[in-house]
Image (cartoon, rainbow, N blue to C red):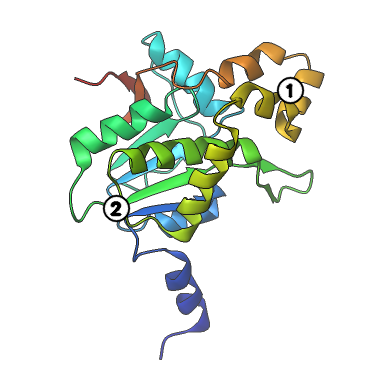
Amino acid sequence: MTSNASKVQAIHQQRHYAVRHDWGLAGAAAISTGVDVAVVVDVLSFTTTLSVAADLGITVLPHHLAKTAPVVVGACLRNAAAVAGWITDRHRGAATRLAVVSAGERWPDGSLRPGVEDLWGAGAVIAALARRGWTDLSPEAEVAGDAHRSIDGDPSGALVSCASGRELIAAGYPDDVEVAAEADASDVVPVMIDAGFVGVRPS
């Protein structure tokens, strides 16, 4: 007999969908099962910093990130369209499965705080995938895409107003928030190769 724990796990893996979305390490572990590409999103600030470093040709060693898929890439608002294009060009197929993971932040007790900026970043990738003809999105992925479309006209205003943006500004890092809002400023895709992320440009 199947245990309740395994039933819950199967339900949350979103296996019936080609494009999936969830939050944090636990969400990544759930939805990355059997996928071809995992996209990690941490807009303020890891994957934005990763995007800038990739633009400069700098290899970045990841922090706490397990290889849960054959291909792992870093995405943010700066490179969402490039990431979607790169995935479509190199991995599109009828059986291809993608996991888009919003990293989120942490509350003082260590529990996950879903940062809306990561939902917008994940949604930017998902919306760009949809524009390239990807269908079969999970409801969780659809919601992320809709969230991004709600701020598409003013990503800077959205980032400076959200809790994580205000936190960075108050800490003296307003420029980091502005860089994070540079929607589609980069055509470089950080791809995990061996032990680090390396910038790859579309061919």
State whether residue 41 appears in this view: no
Q: Which residue is mark 2?
A: 97
**How many C-alpha atoms fall within 10 Å of the one at disc 2: few (<14), some, or many (≥20)?**
many
Task: Give the number of the disc on residue 168.
Answer: 1
User: Which residue occupies 30% across, 47% down?
Assistant: 134
- Residue in the foreground of this view, choosing between 118 and 38: 118
Task: Look at 59% across and 39% down and name the residue there.
Answer: 150
Q: Across the whole image, how many numbered discs are drawn on residues?
A: 2
Q: Is residue 70 above or below residue 34?
A: above
Would residue 21 be found to the left or right of residue 130 on screen? right
Q: Nearer the viewer, residue 57 or 159?
A: 159
Residue 1 visible in the snapshot? yes
Q: Residue furthest right?
A: 170
Image vertical order of residue 55 relative to residue 127, above or below: above
| Residue 105 drawn above or below residue 30 | above
Quadrant housing residue 45 = top right
Residue lying at 74% horizontally and 28% vertically, measured from the top left? 161
**Residue 64 pos. (x, y %):** 51, 38
Whichever of callouts 1 and 2 sits on the residue coming sooner in the sequence is 2
Q: Secondary structure at mark 1?
A: helix
Mark 1–mark 2 distance (CA, rounded to whole Å):
34 Å
Q: What residue type is disc 2 on? A: Arg
User: Looking at the image, which residue is at 59% across and 33% down?
Assistant: 151
In the visual, does 16 lie left or right of 138? Answer: left
Q: Quadrant of residue 67?
A: top left
> In this orientation, which residue lies closer to the viewer: 25 or 186?
186
Q: Quadrant of the C terminus?
A: top left
How packed mark 1 is, by other alpha carbons closer than 10 Å (few <14, some 14-19, many 20 or more), is: some
C-beta proximity under 8 Å, tags 1 and 2: no
Residue 103: x %, y % from top left: 56, 41
Quadrant for the N terminus, please: bottom left
From the top left corner, tell me how far across and down residue 92 is, in percent: 20, 43
